[in-house]
Image (spheres, rainbow, N blue to C red):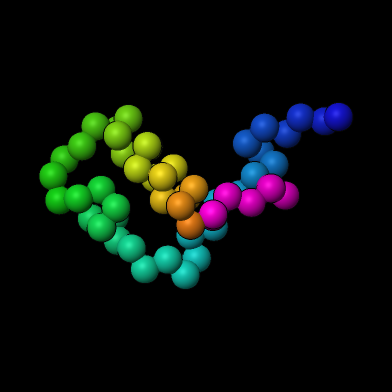
Amino acid sequence: MPRGGLKSMTVNFKGRDESLEDIFGAKPIPVTQMTKLIWGVVKKHKLLKKN
């Protein structure tokens, strides 16, 4: 079975209305927290698709 890893997956934000400030808030945050918040949005709205 071939293993594609992340190359075989896509994330599509088309049609989303949230701004970055809506997702991250107005205060500066560390990159690690930013990554967690982005993946939370992806999972919540089921934006991850396997090709």
The x, y position of residue 13, in whole percent, is 48, 59
Residue 33 image offset from top left, x and y in percent: 30, 34
Look at the image and tell me in which quarter the N terminus lies. top right
Q: Name the residue rendered at 41%, 45% in the picture.
A: 40
Q: Is 11 placed left or right of 30 in the picture? A: right
- Judge whether 1 appears above or below 40 on screen: above
Q: Nearer the viewer, residue 31 or 39?
A: 39
Q: Quadrant of residue 22?
A: bottom left
Q: Residue 10 placed where, x, y %?
A: 61, 49
Single out the residue that lies furthest toward the right. Answer: 1
Left or right: 41 in relation to 2: left
Chain part drawn in magenta = 46-51
Residue at (23% x, 55% y) in the render: 21
At x 15% / y 51%, what residue is drawn? Answer: 26
User: Is residue 48 one of those drawn in magenta?
Assistant: yes
Horizontal and vertical percent position of residue 46: 54, 54
On screen, residue 26 above or below 34: below
Q: Residue at x 50, y 65 (%)?
A: 14
Residue 45 within the segment the image draws in magenta: no
